[in-house]
Amino acid sequence: MKIAFDVDVIREMGITRMVHQVAEWGYKYIEQSPHPQINPFYKHPKASREIMREYKNALNATGVEISSFITVYRWSGPDELRRQAAVKNWKRMIEIAVEMGVQVINTELSGNPNEPEICEEMFYRSMDELLPIIEREGIRVEIQAHPWDFCEQSNETADIVKSFRSDNVKYIYSAPHTFYYDKGVGDVKNMLHYAGDDLSHMLIADTMNHTKHCRYIVNPPGVDATIHQHVAVGEGEVNFDALFEALREMDFANRTYKVGGESIISAALFGYPEKMKYQAVETRELIERELLK
């Protein structure tokens, strides 16, 4: 199992310092979330020769590796032109992953929850074009539901992943999205077991249950908003005792897949860079204690 750190919270450090900081916190792997100079949200990948050379030099200097890239594109529409642009972006991102020797790209369903049928149709249209390339290049694409995607539920998203019957398409469970995944119930153990053998990646962070009265206050009352957090374990309401118990039952730490190798678990702590000097280390130590003991 690869234990990675999502560098979104420290991306303003610059590439070299960012990589060295991850190494100093004791991580061997980086989860490269959208970065304006590499793989920006929704836009065409940048990844200039200079930036990627700097990245490779920092990785070589520290011994750190990239476990995975994160891409977020409008590949589920609902606008067709945006979908076509997203497929183009995907093709370029696959090229960059191959160039960097990274076999895993994780992503979101995207789309719009108010148009789920259209968005699901467009998602499959995009996959019809992309899956042959993904399989040819030996990439493992991991898909998660994100708040405000065309599908926000965990089990339904796992069914979508399983529908491809491909070793190159797997499922990613994001703990801070738990209360969207089953409409506020928070039954992490059931959802993880439902994903089963297709679960290849975990994102670790906590969040409050947005469905509870006054957990968040949004004005005007009833406004249509998707709210969640990526805070340290214990600062929210996700049942991490059940989560880690399920991962142990599934032997997640010892899983190896035909494509992309080992399972991945990533610390995905956002919003509080001033806390990372201890929370990054504490999260890594928690993962090691719960899953590698």
Image (cartoon, rainbow, N blue to C red):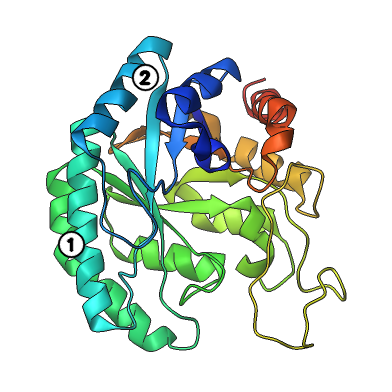
Disc 2 residue crowd, few under 14, some 14–19, many 20+, Cα 10 Å: many
For marks 2 and 1, give the CA distance.
28 Å
For residue 59, what is the image quadrant? top left
Left or right: residue 246 versus residue 157 is right
Q: Residue at x 63, y 52 (%)?
A: 175
Q: Are marks 2 and 1 in contact (CB under 8 Å)?
A: no
Tell me if residue 101 can be seen: no
The numbered mark at residue 121 is none
Left or right: residue 60 versus residue 199 is left
Residue tagged 2: 59
Image coordinates for residue 241, horizontal then vertical, percent: 77, 42
Image coordinates for residue 33, horizontal then vertical, percent: 44, 45
Tell me if residue 139 can be seen: yes
Q: Residue at x 77, y 78 (%)?
A: 218
Left or right: residue 47 versus residue 23 is left
**Which amino acid type is shown beneath numbered disc 2?**
Leu
Q: Is residue 222 above or below residue 190?
A: below
Image coordinates for residue 197, horizontal then vertical, percent: 44, 47
Mark sitting earlier along the chain (2/1): 2
Q: Residue at x 53, y 74 (%)?
A: 148
**Split into 4 quadrants, where in the image is the C terminus?**
top right
**Which amino acid type is shown beneath numbered disc 1?**
Lys
Q: Is residue 70 above or below residue 177?
A: above
Q: Between residue 30 and residue 104, name the one nearer to us.
A: 30
Circle 1 sits in a helix, a strand or a loop, which is it? helix
The numbered mark at residue 88 is 1
Disc 1 residue crowd, few under 14, some 14–19, many 20+, Cα 10 Å: some
Left or right: residue 75 versus residue 15 is left
Q: Is residue 61 above or below residue 65?
A: above
